[in-house]
Image (tube, rainbow, N blue to C red):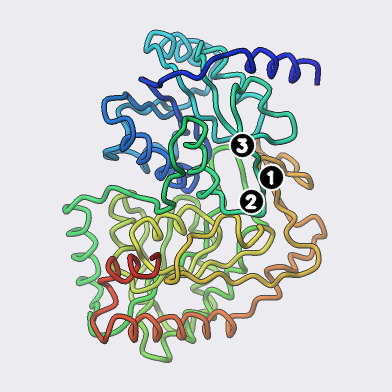
């Protein structure tokens, strides 16, 4: 507390800096990086001549490569020696303004050690001791919206909340070719189902995953209605996909496994709708205007889901939920070197309470609504629809 007060006192004496070089610190997974894109876009729009750096984790780098809003990406090191080299490099770049999108001690300390004079972020339980400016943070409000509001700390309006992901024509071509090899019929709806997620290099979050067998039951219900299903498998998702397959009565159209991130994203873009847990692919789909049905349990339903009328959130609202608090695993532990978040009651009831039939009804209703709103045009073309929905 003494250090926190001293840090705030020092920060209060500093004058506002006219930024020339920015650093955005956003470690975590792919979804975390994508939720930072509204802020990055806003920085580029308001400071077109500034240089924008991003510090992120290895698994999130690919989510920002090719972004027109980023000049250079720093990958978070794994050793103390590499951290020292990175700090020295950041000092040489003469970065004057840092946005810290985390609420823990090390993230604030990093920007201070890098010699960055203006350090902006969130006021959250004394964790931002080294910040020179902050806004209140709430785990019950949209994270993407709150990140966009950080722009107000440098006198600019809050950023629009739409996330972005740069997708190449080659990736789209590869995804279409793969679908055609499976026998895809463009006249029938295509639903992507992602049973996994919640695994990164530093953390494991099984409490945030809906039951894989129910994803399989959902696939069976959809296929009975002549809806094509593709199972989406990212790194570490194979056990969950296989469990879903064991509970699906018919084989899916295909399994999108082992794909480069860009092709995986392009496969999402080809879907009329995607059913996901609270994971990176949820944000990856939303960043491409693909309708999402997100299944949430321990997370507050307003915190991470994408915004807009083309998306739906399913949340049981059991009495013990939400229990997942950002940057804190109150009921967590460690296993195999990873920070582990499991159901503290051991019942997983916030996910068990959601049935395959309930999700099926939401998916079918949403497909019908999107078809009606797009005036019988193919619902793959949803950019215009999403624009109208967010007006």
- The mark nearer the N terminus, 2 or 1, is 2
Q: Please identify the quadrant where the C terminus is shown.
A: bottom left
Residue located beneath label 1 in the image: 340
Secondary element type, mark 2:
loop
Could you say which disc has been placed on residue 285 in the image?
none
- Answer few, some or many: residues within 10 Å of disc 3's Cα (few below 14, many 20 plus, some between 14 and 19): some
Residue located beneath label 2 in the image: 205
Q: CA distance from mark 2 to mark 3?
A: 28 Å
Task: Pick the residue in front: 139 or 256.
Answer: 139
Secondary element type, mark 1:
strand
- Answer few, some or many: residues within 10 Å of disc 2's Cα (few below 14, many 20 plus, some between 14 and 19): many
State yes or no: discs 2 and 1 in contact (Cβ < 8 Å): yes
- Is residue 334 placed above or below 144 in the rendered structure? above
Residue 54 placed where, x, y %? 41, 29
Of the two numbered discs 3 and 1 in the rendering, the one whose residue sits closer to the viewer = 3
Residue 59 falls in which quadrant of the image? top left
Residue located beneath label 3 in the image: 135
State yes or no: discs 3 and 1 in contact (Cβ < 8 Å): no
Residue 103 placed where, x, y %? 64, 34
- Is residue 274 placed above or below 101 in the rendered structure? below
Residue 104 placed where, x, y %? 66, 31
- The mark nearer the N terminus, 3 or 1, is 3
Residue 75 falls in which quadrant of the image? top left
Taking the spot 34% from the left edge, 82% from the top edge, the residue there is 373
Specify whether 341 is left or right of 248.
Answer: right
């Amino acid at each position: 507390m003494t250090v926190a007060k001293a840090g705030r006192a020092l920060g209060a004496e500093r004058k506002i800096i006219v930024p020339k070089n920015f650093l955005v610190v956003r470690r975590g997974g792919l979804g975390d990086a994508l939720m930072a894109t509204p802020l990055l876009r806003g920085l580029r729009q308001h400071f077109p001549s500034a240089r924008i750096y991003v510090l992120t984790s290895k698994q999130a780098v690919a989510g920002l490569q090719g972004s027109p809003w980023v000049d250079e990406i720093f990958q978070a090191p794994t050793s103390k020696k590499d951290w020292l080299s990175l700090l020295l490099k950041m000092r040489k770049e003469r970065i004057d303004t840092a946005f810290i999108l985390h609420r823990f001690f090390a993230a604030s300390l990093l920007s201070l050690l890098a010699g960055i004079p203006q350090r902006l972020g969130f006021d959250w339980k004394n964790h931002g001791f080294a910040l020179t400016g902050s806004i209140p943070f709430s785990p019950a409000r949209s994270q993407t919206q709150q990140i966009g509001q950080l722009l107000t700390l440098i006198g600019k309006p809050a950023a629009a909340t739409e996330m972005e992901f740069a997708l190449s024509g080659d990736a789209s071509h590869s995804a279409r070719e793969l679908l055609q090899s499976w026998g895809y019929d463009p006249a029938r709806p295509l639903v992507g189902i992602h049973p996994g997620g919640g695994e990164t290099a530093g953390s494991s979050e099984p409490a945030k995953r809906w039951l894989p067998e129910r994803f399989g039951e959902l696939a069976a219900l959809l296929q009975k209605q002549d809806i094509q299903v593709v199972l989406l498998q990212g790194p570490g998702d194979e056990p969950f996909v296989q469990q879903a397959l064991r509970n699906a009565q018919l084989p899916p159209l295909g399994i999108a496994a082992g794909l480069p991130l860009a092709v995986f994203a392009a496969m999402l873009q080809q879907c009329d709708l995607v059913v996901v847990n609270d994971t990176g692919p949820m944000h990856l789909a939303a960043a491409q205007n693909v309708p999402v049905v997100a299944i949430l349990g321990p997370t507050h339903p307003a915190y991470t889901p994408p915004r807009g009328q083309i998306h739906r959130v399913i949340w049981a609202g059991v009495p013990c939920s939400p229990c997942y608090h950002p940057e804190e695993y109150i009921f967590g532990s460690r296993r195999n070197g990873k920070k582990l978040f499991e159901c503290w009651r051991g019942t997983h009831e916030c996910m068990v309470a959601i049935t395959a039939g309930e999700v099926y009804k939401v998916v079918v209703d949403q497909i019908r609504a999107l078809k009606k709103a797009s005036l019988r045009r193919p619902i793959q073309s949803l950019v215009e629809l999403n624009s109208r929905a967010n007006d």
